[in-house]
Image (cartoon, rainbow, N blue to C red):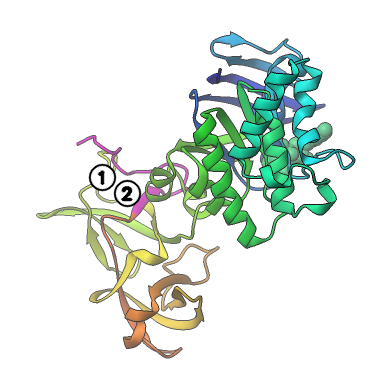
């Protein structure tokens, strides 16, 4: 039976250094939940705390409302899959999968059925008599997954399980992992620093930085309404601009530093005329228009599905760490804009713009549904 997980005001220290100062999050029963963040932000540390491999310096972790802080790792009924497959090289695929059941002294007949079922779920039945050395990386990871779930754990923890695989296989395997998770319906906590993988595989994502959760939400919500500039630039690409809030007879608008104004009907009530803000626009949310931001094409990169344009602004309207902006377009639509050096007028889609406090720490957008 699968469990929900509650992490309540958890603290992690290594000696004097505080890695996780105060972290709370609830993971629902049966959910595929991803911890996403840059290297060193504390994802693995948090996962290992859930597993019971790391001590907890404050707060509580509960499975289905039972506090497990003092329960030893091997008694937490957890399945784990790591980056390096951790399967036994001298055992066949079948023996690897049987291993956990043998330790638990499951009767032989039961064991056979359970192993057959799981080998089928991860689609590796026909290789059950092979040794791991005769398997590809993806196949080895399927064995590791089978071994983790055959014991019917209440929680499945996965730490960058795909990072040793090449790009194509990663995409195939993330589909396979999600399919298996859907079939067995087990609460899964998945660690990755790959934002595309997180968007593709998760029910919900927690974006972490420096031991602090920046935002928790469904992939689409995090992408379209990031809660701060860190999330906006970590997940996908975002162009950042200085701006100021204004108001006229048509309502509130944001004015970019070059004077271009765009009216918005989804700014929070906190936005008052004169307020300085940071504006974020994704590359795919610009369109060529007669009115908009004036830019010069600085470079372009053909990326197959679309062409990415690097653009320059005449004046200092971009934040200092942003030397130019990006603008992506399907090549089918790109015929009108060709050469490096050309000038363009780009209109940001007002419905897709995000506005943050000047320091970038908070969103100034209305919450979905609050009108
Ligand atoms: N045993 C340890 N002793 C001291 N510091 C540690 C220990 N393990 C991890 N850290 C530190 O804790 C911080 C978080 O590490 P953690 O491995 O959780 O990060 P991560 O987000 O999983 O990164 P990555 O994506 O690189 O694996 C890092 O600054 C790391 O140096």
Quadrant of the snapshot with the N terminus: top right
The image quarter containing residue 116 is top right
Give the labeled residue for mark 2: 275
Give the labeled residue for mark 1: 272
Q: Residue drawn at (26%, 58%), measured in percent from left and top?
A: 350
Please state the extent of the stretch shown in magenta in the rendering.
Answer: 354-371
Quadrant of the snapshot with the C terminus: top left
Q: Is residue 152 left or right of residue 339?
A: right
On screen, 140 above or below 27? below
Q: Position of residue 69 (x, y in %)?
A: 69, 13
92 or 346: nearer the viewer: 92
The image quarter containing residue 347 is bottom left
Label 1: few (<14), some (14–19) or many (≥20) C-alpha neighbours in 10 Å: some
Would residue 47 be seen by someone viewing this image from the given angle? no
Would residue 322 be seen by someone viewing this image from the given angle? yes
Q: Residue drawn at (58%, 54%), measured in percent from left and top?
A: 172
The verdict on residue 344 being magenta is no
């Amino acid at each position: 039976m699968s469990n929900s997980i509650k992490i309540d005001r958890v603290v992690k220290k290594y000696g004097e250094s505080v890695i996780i100062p105060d972290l709370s999050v609830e993971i629902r029963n049966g959910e595929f939940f991803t911890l996403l963040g840059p290297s060193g932000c504390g994802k693995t540390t948090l996962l290992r705390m859930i597993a019971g491999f790391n001590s907890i310096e404050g707060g509580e972790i509960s499975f289905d409302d039972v506090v497990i802080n003092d329960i030893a790792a091997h008694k937490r009924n957890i399945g784990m899959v790591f980056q390096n497959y951790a399967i036994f090289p001298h055992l066949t695929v079948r023996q690897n999968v049987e291993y956990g059941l043998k330790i638990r002294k499951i009767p032989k007949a039961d064991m056979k059925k359970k192993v057959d079922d799981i080998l089928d779920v991860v689609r590796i039945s026909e290789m059950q008599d092979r040794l791991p050395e005769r398997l590809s990386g993806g196949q080895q990871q399927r064995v590791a997954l089978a071994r983790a779930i055959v014991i019917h754990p209440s929680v499945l923890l996965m730490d960058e399980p795909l990072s040793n695989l090449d790009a194509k296989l990663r995409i195939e395997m993330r589909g396979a992992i999600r399919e298996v998770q859907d079939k067995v319906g087990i609460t899964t906590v998945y660690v990755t620093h790959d934002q595309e993988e997180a968007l593709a595989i998760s029910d919900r994502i927690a974006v972490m930085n420096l031991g602090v959760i920046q935002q928790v939400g469904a992939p689409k919500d995090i992408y379209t309404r990031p809660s701060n500039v860190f999330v906006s630039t970590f997940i996908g690409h975002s162009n950042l601009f200085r701006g100021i809030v204004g108001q006229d007879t048509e309502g509130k608008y944001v004015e970019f530093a070059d004077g271009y104004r765009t009216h918005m009907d989804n700014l929070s009530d906190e936005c008052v005329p004169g307020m300085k803000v940071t504006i974020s626009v994704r590359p795919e949310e610009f369109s060529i228009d007669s009115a908009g931001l004036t830019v010069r094409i600085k470079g372009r990169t053909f990326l197959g599905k679309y062409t990415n344009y690097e653009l320059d602004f005449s004046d200092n309207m971009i934040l200092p760490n942003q030397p130019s902006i990006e603008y992506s377009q399907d090549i089918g639509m790109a015929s009108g804009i060709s050469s490096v050096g050309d000038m363009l007028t780009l209109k940001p889609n007002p419905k897709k713009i995000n506005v943050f406090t000047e320091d970038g720490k908070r969103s100034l957008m209305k919450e979905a549904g609050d009108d």
